[in-house]
């Protein structure tokens, strides 16, 4: 068949995920294999997401990438190089098996990616970013990949990205193989399973975070005895309990496990030497407020969780959200000159 040199272009979006059983620690830094399994909720595509356009053309001499409008060096980013190489190798194998296929594996790749939220502020930008990159690559190169296979490719870019490949409630099975072939995500329940569950994101500070996840978790694994205890004695049982809470749509159980796991993640950060602090005084005030609300009400109303930054994510049933929002805005009023529209662009520290 004639090979057309016409350029190809595909655009996709991928959502952010917020972990309720946290990933923090690698047993293999190159293949990004984790020290424990984790579980997250993928948010709706309509909310926080990455949008990536990839063009493939014989006239693209080198691979190039633009992140939020600024060009960044592809060769300087080893994980990006690994993702591109893995996708190209896969395409090459398909072309070798079927000489009729166009030789897209020899064309250059141009990537444009942007987030509709602050990049690298502990709001999971690498998760949606790499999930989107890998998914778009698979589309533009016509790679026939299943969800778990796509998640393994995304994992090479960033661990948490493997969970953003699927919607709803997603677990990343840490796996046992040294080559990572069983370290992949699976869907615990689809996005339709628990529609009443909502997430509220409280932006405490959208500055770029102080300690990168990669360096932070490396130091934790090297120095924290509490982390070793967490990997073997806490997470396996907590993964089972969390899957049951989700299957039963048991919010009280889901909330307790989520808050306990966030607390333990930040405890192993504190147990790291030198210590890592992601939560600030405003984050701690959010913990106190949620704890007070849950104690004063007859049932658990909300769960807080914090990632590698001070921003809070609050999970709650939709029925409780209006009241919670009233309480958060009462105790943490936004500066009057900040409109909702400016919320994600303004560098002012706030909730
Ligand atoms: C998580 N975080 O499970 C945890 C909770 C942050 C706190 O996954 O080195 O950016 O790229 O694999 O995925 C952040 O780590 O780290 C993270 P890499 P990643 O969502």
Image (tube, rainbow, N blue to C red):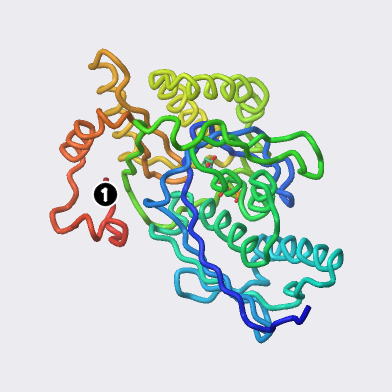
| Residue 238 shown left or right of residue 78 in the figure | left
Q: Is residue 60 above or below residue 216?
A: below
Residue at coordinates 61% horizontally, 74% vertically from top-left?
Answer: 73
Q: Nearer the viewer, residue 99 or 295?
A: 99
Farthest-out residue, front: 1
Label 1 belongs to which residue? 350
Residue at coordinates 18% horizontally, 40% vertically from top-left?
Answer: 329
> Image quarter for residue 141?
bottom right
Give the x, y percent position of residue 276. Answer: 51, 42
Mark 1 packing: few (<14 Cα in 10 Å), some, or many (20+)?
some
Residue at coordinates 29% horizontally, 34% vertically from top-left?
Answer: 285
Farthest-out residue, top: 298
Residue at coordinates 74% horizontally, 66% vertically from top-left?
Answer: 88
Q: Nearer the viewer, residue 35 or 61?
A: 61
Give the x, y percent position of residue 22. Answer: 54, 35
Farthest-out residue, left: 336
Q: Quadrant of ligand 1?
A: top right
Give the x, y percent position of residue 267. Answer: 51, 30
Q: Nearer the viewer, residue 135 or 2?
A: 2
Q: Is residue 6 above or below residue 65?
A: below
| Residue 292 shown left or right of residue 86 in the figure | left
Total numbered circles:
1
Q: Secondary structure at mark 1?
A: loop
Which part of the image, by quadrant, shows the C terminus?
Answer: top left
Q: Is residue 341 above or below residue 172?
A: below
Mark 1 lies within 8 Å of ligand 1 (Cβ measured): no
Give the x, y percent position of residue 69. Answer: 45, 74
Which part of the image, by quadrant, shows the N terminus?
Answer: bottom right
> Image quarter for residue 36?
top right
């Amino acid at each position: 068949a004639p090979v057309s040199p016409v350029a190809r272009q595909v655009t996709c979006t991928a959502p952010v995920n917020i972990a309720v059983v946290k990933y923090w620690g690698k047993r293999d830094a190159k293949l990004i294999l984790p020290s424990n399994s984790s579980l997250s909720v993928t948010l709706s595509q309509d909310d926080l997401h990455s949008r990536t356009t990839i063009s493939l053309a014989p006239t693209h001499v080198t691979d190039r990438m633009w992140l939020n409008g600024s060009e960044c060096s592809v060769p300087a980013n080893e994980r990006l190089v690994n993702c591109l190489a893995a996708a190209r190798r896969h395409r090459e194998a398909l072309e070798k098996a079927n000489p009729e296929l166009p030789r897209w594996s020899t064309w250059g790749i141009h990537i444009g990616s942007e987030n509709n939220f602050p990049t690298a502020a502990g709001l999971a930008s690498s998760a949606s970013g790499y999930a989107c990159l890998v998914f778009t690559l698979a589309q533009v190169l016509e790679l026939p990949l299943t969800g778990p296979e796509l998640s393994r490719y995304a994992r090479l870019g960033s661990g948490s990205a493997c969970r953003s490949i699927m919607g709803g409630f997603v677990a990343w099975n840490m796996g046992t193989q040294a080559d990572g072939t069983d370290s992949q995500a699976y869907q615990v329940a689809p996005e339709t399973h628990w529609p009443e569950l909502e997430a509220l994101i409280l932006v405490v500070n959208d500055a770029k975070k102080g300690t990168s996840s990669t360096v932070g978790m490396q130091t934790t694994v090297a120095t924290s005895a509490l982390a070793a205890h967490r990997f073997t004695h806490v997470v396996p049982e907590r993964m089972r309990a969390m899957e049951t809470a989700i299957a039963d749509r048991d919010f009280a159980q889901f909330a307790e496990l989520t808050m306990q796991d966030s607390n333990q993640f930040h405890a192993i950060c504190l147990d790291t030497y030198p210590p890592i602090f992601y939560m600030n005084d405003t984050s701690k005030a959010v913990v106190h407020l949620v704890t007070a609300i849950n104690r004063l009400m007859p049932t658990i109303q909300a769960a807080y969780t914090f990632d590698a930054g001070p921003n809070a994510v609050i999970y709650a049933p939709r029925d409780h959200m209006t009241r919670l929002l009233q309480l958060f805005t009462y105790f943490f009023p936004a500066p009057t000159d900040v409109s909702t529209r400016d919320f994600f662009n303004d560098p002012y520290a706030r909730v």
